[in-house]
Image (tube, rainbow, N blue to C red):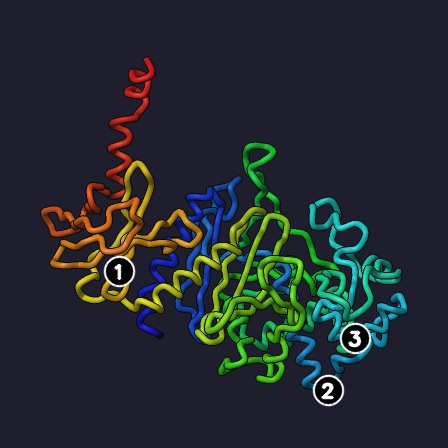
């Protein structure tokens, strides 16, 4: 493991837990793989607000559209075995489709370029208003003319991936969940992954609503069976198992259930999401983004009560999975924030002996600030930001426990002194940055209760 990575991981964990508290989220699980080894696995918050059950790394989450990446790998395994081709027409395997749908190729459906309806005329399953679609409903919705002809544009379709699940059943002669569990999940060595909630036996995180319009969150059980939509949105897994799986999809992975050629095809940027501002592309069951050495691919998922996201960074040999159990979960910006943290450490390096003690989260009435040693600098991060090192100040250490603020906004305290204050046992108990005295969270809590506690507050208002 790179030295800078071992230094970055504790801050990733600390920042995510702060973010969860700061945004009042129920729970968050994170896993990071270096190569195919899990190097960070953590869970924060609550699995179920109604019971107060603590969230652990062993809790399964509904990972929703991550399921498409498992379905994609299953199809590519069938291609490698010579049992189908990506340019086969889906109508050759599934009867009852509209002629235009039947003429679409497996590859077009797999790349979300077949022009199919996203979720049919009634997508109440994603609003908890009806069960997930069965086979008959999916085929009925695909037996009529579709919104676009094939290969005109990227158009995401859960119905399309449900159709691919039916293709797998037709080719293998087995139920989708049974075959995918054997030929993808088990073959990849995953022990905490199941194709559907009905197959999960471990602890499971509950989903949660927004705080509005009830001014409180309510539990959304998230126990809906996937039925024919299992191949599009049914999977349940822990963060670590999701990271283990996606790490195997990297074209350079040492161990995988797919050939390097299939992995390159799966993660290749095929269709741009032109009408969005994120710079995303879709491949064969994968979403790509990023640039240069930090290009990434992976997938995301939105199940009622859950938002999840996973990315593989092939040039960095890293895989990150962030799972949240709220319908407003911040898995997307939090993964961007994790990448931002990793980039920062990769640029600055692990702490030097001179900067190692300049660490910790320090508080004032204005909030929290983090001292983060990286290389020969001490970075002044803001953990409340989604990009905590954005415009971060820098402290240059000049002597033990003494430094100078050498880089920061002119509105702050450039050129002024920075000091560490230790207690009698030698432990750092507070920090001075310029004229600002920052203390521990417990010390600030006591200070605020003394100054603004209920009795003093009543006297002040009187």
**Nearer the N terminus, badge 3 or badge 2?**
2
Q: Earlier in the sequence, mark 1 or mark 2?
A: 2
Mark 1 lies on residue: 373
Q: CA distance from mark 1 to mark 2?
A: 54 Å
Residue name at image x 68 percent, y 52 percent: 224
Residue at 44%, 52% (x, y): give it. 386
Going by the image, does 42 lie left or right of 98? Answer: left
Residue 416, position as x, y percentages in the image? 19, 48
Mark 3 → mark 2, Cα distance in angstroms: 16 Å
- Which residue in the structure is indicated by mark 2? 82
The picture places residue 183, in percent across and down from the top left corner, at 64, 77
Residue 312 visible? The answer is: no
Front residue of 58/407: it is 407
Q: Percent from the top left, x then y, of residue 190? A: 54, 71
Look at the image and tell me in which quarter the C terminus lies. Answer: top left
Residue name at image x 43 percent, y 69 percent:
38
The total number of labels drawn is 3
């Amino acid at each position: 493991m790179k030295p800078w990575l071992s230094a970055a991981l504790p801050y990733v964990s600390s920042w995510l837990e702060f973010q969860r508290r700061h945004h009042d989220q129920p729970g968050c699980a994170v896993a990071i793989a270096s190569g195919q080894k899990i190097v960070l696995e953590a869970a924060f918050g609550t699995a179920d607000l109604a019971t107060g059950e603590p969230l652990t790394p062993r809790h399964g989450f509904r990972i929703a559209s991550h399921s498409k990446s498992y379905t994609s790998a299953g199809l590519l395994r069938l291609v490698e075995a010579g049992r189908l081709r990506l340019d086969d027409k889906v109508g050759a395997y599934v009867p009852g489709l509209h002629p235009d749908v039947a003429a679409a190729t497996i590859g077009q459906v797999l790349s979300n370029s077949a022009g199919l309806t996203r979720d049919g005329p009634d997508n109440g399953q994603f609003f908890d208003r009806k069960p997930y679609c069965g086979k008959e409903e999916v085929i009925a919705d695909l037996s009529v003319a579709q919104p676009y002809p094939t290969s005109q544009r990227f158009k995401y379709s859960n119905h399309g991936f449900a159709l691919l699940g039916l293709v797998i059943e037709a080719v293998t002669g087995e139920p989708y969940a049974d075959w995918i569990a054997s030929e993808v999940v088990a073959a990849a060595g995953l022990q905490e992954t199941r194709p559907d909630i009905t197959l999960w036996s471990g602890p499971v995180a509950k989903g949660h609503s927004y705080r509005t319009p009830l001014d409180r969150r309510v539990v959304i059980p998230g126990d809906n069976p996937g039925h024919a939509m299992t191949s599009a949105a049914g999977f349940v897994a822990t963060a670590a198992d999701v990271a283990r799986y996606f790490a195997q999809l990297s074209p350079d992975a040492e161990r995988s259930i797919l050939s390097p050629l299939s992995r390159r095809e799966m993660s290749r940027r095929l269709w741009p999401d032109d009408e969005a501002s994120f710079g995303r592309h879709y491949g064969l069951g994968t979403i790509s983004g990023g640039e240069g050495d930090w290009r990434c691919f992976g997938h995301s998922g939105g199940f009622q009560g859950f938002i999840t996201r996973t990315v593989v960074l092939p040039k960095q040999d890293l895989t990150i999975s962030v799972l949240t159990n709220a319908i407003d979960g911040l898995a997307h910006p939090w993964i961007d924030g994790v990448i931002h943290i990793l980039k920062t450490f990769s640029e600055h390096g692990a702490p030097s002996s001179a900067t190692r003690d300049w660490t910790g989260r320090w508080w004032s009435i204005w909030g929290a600030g983090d001292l983060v040693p990286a290389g020969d600098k001490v970075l002044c991060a803001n953990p409340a930001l989604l990009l905590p090192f954005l415009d971060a100040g820098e402290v240059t250490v000049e002597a033990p426990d003494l430094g100078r603020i050498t880089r920061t906004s002119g509105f702050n305290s450039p050129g002024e002194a920075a000091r560490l204050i230790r207690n009698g046992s030698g432990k750092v108990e507070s920090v001075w940055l310029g004229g600002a005295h920052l203390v521990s969270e417990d010390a600030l809590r006591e200070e605020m209760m003394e100054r603004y506690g209920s009795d003093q507050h009543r006297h002040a208002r009187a």
